[in-house]
Amino acid sequence: MSRWLCILLVACATTAQAAPQGANTDEMDRLIADKGLLTRLEDVSHRVADKAHTVADNASNLAIHAMGFLGVPYKRGGNSAEIGFDCSGFVRAMYEQTVGLLLPRRADQQAAATQVIDKKDLQPGDLVFFNTMRRNFSHVGIYVGDNKFIHSPRSGSEVRVEDMGVTYWARRFNGARRVATDKDAASSK
């Protein structure tokens, strides 16, 4: 996709440099049409829009899918509904089942493998990280919207939705991340 955009930009720059000052815009339009540049630009534009729509759908589906696991018990090291989830196991399972991406196993590894975003830019499906064990990125959840996230919190508890504005979570918030859309970028080692 970016290859076509580069070709288009180079072609436009070459055309702009080759056109004498005061050249008729009709001639420029004809040249652009002859080279098929508008068709290529429209094609790239449609592909970008389709991909953005697919990513948004996947993120929404992920948040909805995760809600189906409310009540599953916490299990240290757990990564399935049958045995239970810990926080990173829950996030990893949701991304694998819904989007087909295999994230790293630990919360700190998930933070390192994802794109930093501003908290104000959070969208459903993004990851939220917290310092719950006196170290950065020791806890992770999935943002579901309306300043809420779903996670598997701790031993003796179960998957649930919480408000990030609650003092406990607000004080421990470590950052927000967005999972890469490219499967290779997010696959674990």
Image (cartoon, helix red, strand yellow):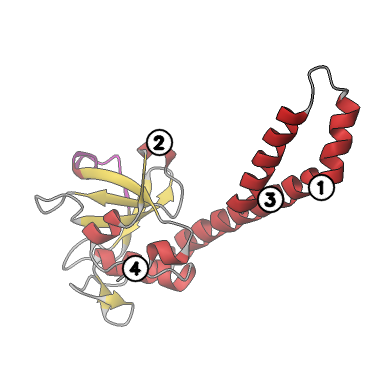
Place residue 161 in its image quadrant.
bottom left
Which residue reaches farthest top?
22
Amino acid marked by disc 1: Gly
Task: Give the alpha-carbon distance from disc 4 to disc 2, as whole Å.
Answer: 24 Å
Crowding around mark 1 (Cα neighbors within 10 Å: few <14, some 14 to 19, many 20+) is few
Q: Which circle's residue, 2 or 3, is located before the other in the chain? A: 3
Q: Where is residue 10 in the image (x, y as percent from the top left)?
A: 65, 40
Determine whether the residue tagged by mark 4 lies in a helix, strand or loop. helix
* Residue displayed at 27% across by 65% down: 88
Q: Which circle's residue, 1 or 3, is located before the other in the chain? A: 1
Disc 4: which residue: 92
Q: In which quarter of the image is the C terminus?
A: bottom left
Task: Give the alpha-carbon distance from disc 1 to disc 2, as whole Å.
Answer: 40 Å
Q: Which circle's residue, 1 or 4, is located before the other in the chain? A: 1
Amino acid marked by disc 2: Lys
Amino acid marked by disc 4: Arg
Disc 1: which residue: 36
Disc 3: which residue: 44
* Residue displayed at 78% across by 18% down: 21
Disc 2: which residue: 120
**Depth check, front residue: 123 or 47:** 47
Crowding around mark 3 (Cα neighbors within 10 Å: few <14, some 14 to 19, many 20+) is some
Amino acid marked by disc 3: Val
Task: Give the alpha-carbon distance from disc 2 to disc 3, as whole Å.
Answer: 29 Å
Range shown magenta: 162-171
Q: Does the magenta stretch include residue 19?
A: no
Q: Nearer the viewer, mark 4 or mark 3?
A: 3
The answer to whether the residue labelled 4 contacts the one labelled 3, judged by CB atoms less than 8 Å apart, is no
| Residue 14 placement, left or right of 64 | right
Q: Which circle's residue, 4 or 3, is located before the other in the chain? A: 3
Q: In this view, does 23 lie above or below 1?
A: above
